[in-house]
């Protein structure tokens, strides 16, 4: 220390109390100036040497400590320690605490926005058209800050004078200059307060016959007539307010930037909730095509099974048309999935990444799986010749089955007769058995069929049958366009029955 109050710091010579900048300069200072006492020089060198050794030892300790840590980590990797079963400790949910903090923060913004919307609704209610009456109405709804309390504009910090006047926000009453003012049209204000049903715009803007310029002149004239009865400062402010209005003739509210930002944030949130992204629209259309394809596929498989069996319930041409429709729907699903995957790829600077890209890839993969599992495995229809062969084979099988069933019925009837005749005497039983054998041979040789008795309809029902047949043809056409082939089959069978009944009745009348 040089004195009682002064504290010296650094590499200080203990003899002459000079401040040196580094230890090398201090040793050099001792060797050159204080070389008379070698013991002091030696002690100083020993002191520097001890400090150097201590510093080097600390470095060695840190290096050895890091080496030991790496060795321990390698041992833990190689050896798995069995800690045994561990019990769960205390569990605490922080959801309520998080919701309290989050709700308080959201409530602060929502409360301010709701206050502005309530004031805006009150301002729009019974809004006068005259500028002076309108200004009084706005001041009664929202109290304005006194002009004397504000010397500078809060936004731009510029002073007010005759060219830069003071204006008030119609929602919070704050003072600002004209450059920091934001205008909100009355139509947008009405949409914010009542978006479903906008009120009558008669008080919002002048009539269609009047031009905006003439409406402005009329309003200015009304204001000037009232300004003639008011003080000079009020008249000057009113004239300047009319001059500072926006160039468009539409009426508006003068707002500050902060109130306008809160209202715009609410509108953006509404738009984000109501509007869907383009990916969602594409996906919805793709899902409708998929549902349509599944409906067509169920009907097509049903028709394919019927036609493969040789049945005449469905028409082969209808099945072919339905197959073409399924192919078109599958092509639409493929194209839409490709569009979803290609959205945003043209933007080289900001290509889709992360979750957005993964979502589009998954949509494309699901579309490909749907096409492979449902549409690409669709069975092929038989051509007309193959279908004709299938129908003939089916008719042959039906005839053989009918003949076989008739034979079984004849044999069953013969067995019943034999059982009844065994109850009689042996003589009568022998003769009855010969007769039944002869009858069986005759029946087997000649056979029998169902009666061809015609269905007799009264002659008065001829015209209604023709009308009903025409109605059935129109119903068949409608059902075929809507791909309801089950109804087409039932209606065609009804039509055939009506036609056969009509022809038999006509033949009976002609005979």
Image (spheres, grey):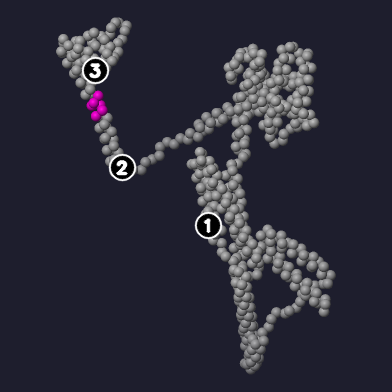
Q: Quadrant of residue 108?
A: top right
Q: Nearer the viewer, residue 118 or 180?
A: 180
Q: Quadrant of residue 294?
A: bottom right
Which marked residue is nearer to the observer: mark 2 or mark 3?
3
- Measured in 3D between alpha carbons, the distance from the residue under mark 3 to the one under mark 1, in whole angstroms, is 83 Å
Magenta stretch: dominant SS? helix
* Residue with the most extreme right position: 460
Q: Position of residue 380 (x, y in %)?
A: 57, 65
Q: Quadrant of the C terminus?
A: bottom right
Q: Nearer the viewer, residue 88 or 258?
A: 258
Q: Quadrant of residue 247?
A: top right
* Callout 1 secondary element: helix
Q: Position of residue 38 (x, y in %)?
A: 15, 13
Q: Which region is colored magenta? A: 55-60
Q: Earlier in the sequence, mark 2 or mark 3?
A: 3
Left or right, 53 with reference to 271: left
- Measured in 3D between alpha carbons, the distance from the residue under mark 2 to the one under mark 3, in whole angstroms, is 49 Å
Q: Nearer the viewer, residue 497 or 200?
A: 200
Crowd class of label 3 (few under 14; some 14 to 19; many from 20; radius 10 Å): few
According to the image, label 3 marks what residue?
24
According to the image, label 2 marks what residue?
77
- Residue 421 against residue 244 in the figure, above or below: below
According to the image, label 1 marks what residue?
372
Tell me the number on the disc at residue 67: none
- Residue 33 against residue 354 in the figure, above or below: above
Q: Earlier in the sequence, mark 3 or mark 1?
A: 3
Q: Are marks 1 and 2 in contact (CB under 8 Å)?
A: no
Q: Are marks 3 and 1 in contact (CB under 8 Å)?
A: no
Which marked residue is nearer to the observer: mark 1 or mark 2?
1
Which marked residue is nearer to the observer: mark 3 or mark 1?
3
> Residue 295: in sight, yes or no?
yes
* Callout 2 secondary element: helix
């Amino acid at each position: 220390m040089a004195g009682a109050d002064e504290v010296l710091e650094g590499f200080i010579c203990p003899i002459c109390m000079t401040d040196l900048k580094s230890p090398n300069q201090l040793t050099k200072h001792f060797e050159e100036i204080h070389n008379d006492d070698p013991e002091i020089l030696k002690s100083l060198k020993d002191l520097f040497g001890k400090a150097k050794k201590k510093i080097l030892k600390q470095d060695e300790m840190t290096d050895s400590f890091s080496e030991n840590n790496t060795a321990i980590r390698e041992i833990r990797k190689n050896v798995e320690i069995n800690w045994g079963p561990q019990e769960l400790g205390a569990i605490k949910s922080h959801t309520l605490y998080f919701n309290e903090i989050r709700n308080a923060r959201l409530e602060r913004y929502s409360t301010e926005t709701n206050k502005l919307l309530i004031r805006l609704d009150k301002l729009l209610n019974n809004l006068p058209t005259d500028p002076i009456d309108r200004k009084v109405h706005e001041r009664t709804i929202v109290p304005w800050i006194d002009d004397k309390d504000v010397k500078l504009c809060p936004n731009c910090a510029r002073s007010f004078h005759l060219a830069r006047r003071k204006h008030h926000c119609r929602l919070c009453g704050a003072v600002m200059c004209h450059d920091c003012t934001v205008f909100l049209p009355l139509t947008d204000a009405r949409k914010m307060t009542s978006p479903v049903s906008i009120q009558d715009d008669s008080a919002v803007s002048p009539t269609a016959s009047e031009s905006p310029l003439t409406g402005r002149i009329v309003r200015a004239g009304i204001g000037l007539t009232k300004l003639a009865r008011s003080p000079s400062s009020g008249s000057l402010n009113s004239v300047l307010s009319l001059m500072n209005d926006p160039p468009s003739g539409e009426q508006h509210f003068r707002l500050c930037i902060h109130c306008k930002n809160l209202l715009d944030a609410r509108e953006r949130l509404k738009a984000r909730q109501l509007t869907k992204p383009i990916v969602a629209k594409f996906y919805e259309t793709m899902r409708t095509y998929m549902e349509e394809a599944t409906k067509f596929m169920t009907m097509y498989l049903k028709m394919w099974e019927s036609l493969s069996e040789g049945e005449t319930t469905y028409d082969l041409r209808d099945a072919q048309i339905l197959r073409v429709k399924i192919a078109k729907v599958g092509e639409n699903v493929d194209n839409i999935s490709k569009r979803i995957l290609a959205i945003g790829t043209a933007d080289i600077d900001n290509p889709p990444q992360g979750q957005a890209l993964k979502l589009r890839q998954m949509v494309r993969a699901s579309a490909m799986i749907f096409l492979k599992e449902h549409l690409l495995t669709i069975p092929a229809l038989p051509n007309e010749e193959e279908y004709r062969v299938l129908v003939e084979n089916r008719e042959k099988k039906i005839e053989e089955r009918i003949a076989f069933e008739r034979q079984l019925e004849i044999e069953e009837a013969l067995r019943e007769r034999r059982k009844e005749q065994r109850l009689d005497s042996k003589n009568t039983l022998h003769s009855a058995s010969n007769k039944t054998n002869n009858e069986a041979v005759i029946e087997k040789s000649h056979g029998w069929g169902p009666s061809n008795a015609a269905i007799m309809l009264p002659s008065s029902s001829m015209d209604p049958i023709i009308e009903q047949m025409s109605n059935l043809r129109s119903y068949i056409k409608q059902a075929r366009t809507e791909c309801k082939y089950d109804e087409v089959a039932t209606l065609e069978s009804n039509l055939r029955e009506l036609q056969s009944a009509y022809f038999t009745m006509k033949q009976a009348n002609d005979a």
